[in-house]
Amino acid sequence: MICIVIPQRALTKYNGQMTNRRGGRIFLRPEVKWFEMACRKNALKQYQGEPLLGPLSVDIVFHFSNNKMPDLFNLPKAVCDALNKIVWKDDRQIVKGSLKKINSGEDRIEITIIEL
C-alpha cells in the first residue's frame, strides 16, 4: 500500500475549464497546470519507486477548509493525471477505487494506492 498526501486544495479538471486556442488545440488553465505541478512535486517527495505497472485500486479523500466544495466527480481527474509516470505508468491502470470529500477544516488530498 502506498499513501500520498498532497497539502493543497483540490482543483477540478474538466473540459469546461479548458481554453481553446487557434488551430483547435486545447490548453489547460494556468491554475490547473500549477495544481498538477504541485501534485507531481509532492508525489515525487513521497514515492521513490518506479511507476507501478499493473491494475490498481485507488482511494482518494479530498479535504476542504470550508463548505465550498466542488462536484466530487470532477475532482480526481487532475490528481490522477498528475501522478502519471510518477506513481503509476498511466491512470488507465486504475480499475477500482473510491472518492470522498469532507469539510475537515484544512485543504489536502489523501491518496491510497493498492496494487491488485
Image (cartoon, helix red, strand yellow):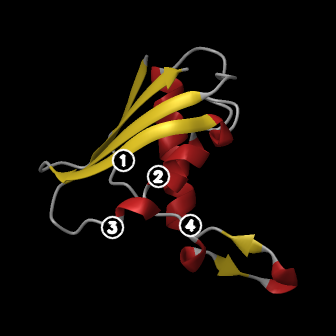
Kindly report which numbered mark, 4 or 3, lies closer to the viewer in this rendering.
Answer: 3
Q: Secondary structure at mark 2?
A: helix
Q: Is residue 110 above or below residue 105?
A: above
In-image side of 9 versus 104 (left or right): right
Residue 6 coordinates in the image, percent (x, y): 37, 38
- Find residue 81 and name its label: none
State yes or no: discs 1 and 4 in contact (Cβ < 8 Å). no
Mark 4: few, some, or many residues within 10 Å (few <14, many ≥20)? few
User: What residue sits right under mark 1 in the picture?
Assistant: 99
Q: Secondary structure at mark 3?
A: loop
User: What residue sits right under mark 2 in the picture?
Assistant: 76
Residue 8 coordinates in the image, percent (x, y): 34, 48
Judging depth in this view, the residue of 1 and 26 nearest the camera is 1
Which is nearer the N-term, disc 1 or disc 4? 4
Identity, as a three-letter code, of the amino acid under mark 2: Pro
Which is nearer the N-term, disc 1 or disc 2? 2
In-image side of 1 versus 32 (left or right): left
User: What residue sits right under mark 4 in the picture?
Assistant: 30
**Residue at image point 45% right, 63% down:** 74
Kindly report which numbered mark, 1 or 2, lies closer to the viewer in this rendering.
Answer: 1
Identity, as a three-letter code, of the amino acid under mark 4: Pro
User: What residue sits right under mark 3 in the picture?
Assistant: 70
Which is nearer the N-term, disc 4 or disc 2? 4
Kindly report which numbered mark, 3 or 1, lies closer to the viewer in this rendering.
Answer: 1
Identity, as a three-letter code, of the amino acid under mark 3: Pro
Q: Secondary structure at mark 1?
A: strand
Q: Quadrant of the N terminus?
A: top left
Number of numbered discs visible in the structure rendering: 4
- Cα–Cα gap, marks 3 and 2: 11 Å
Q: Is residue 57 above or below residue 37?
A: above
State yes or no: discs 1 and 2 in contact (Cβ < 8 Å). yes
In-image side of 60 versus 102 (left or right): right
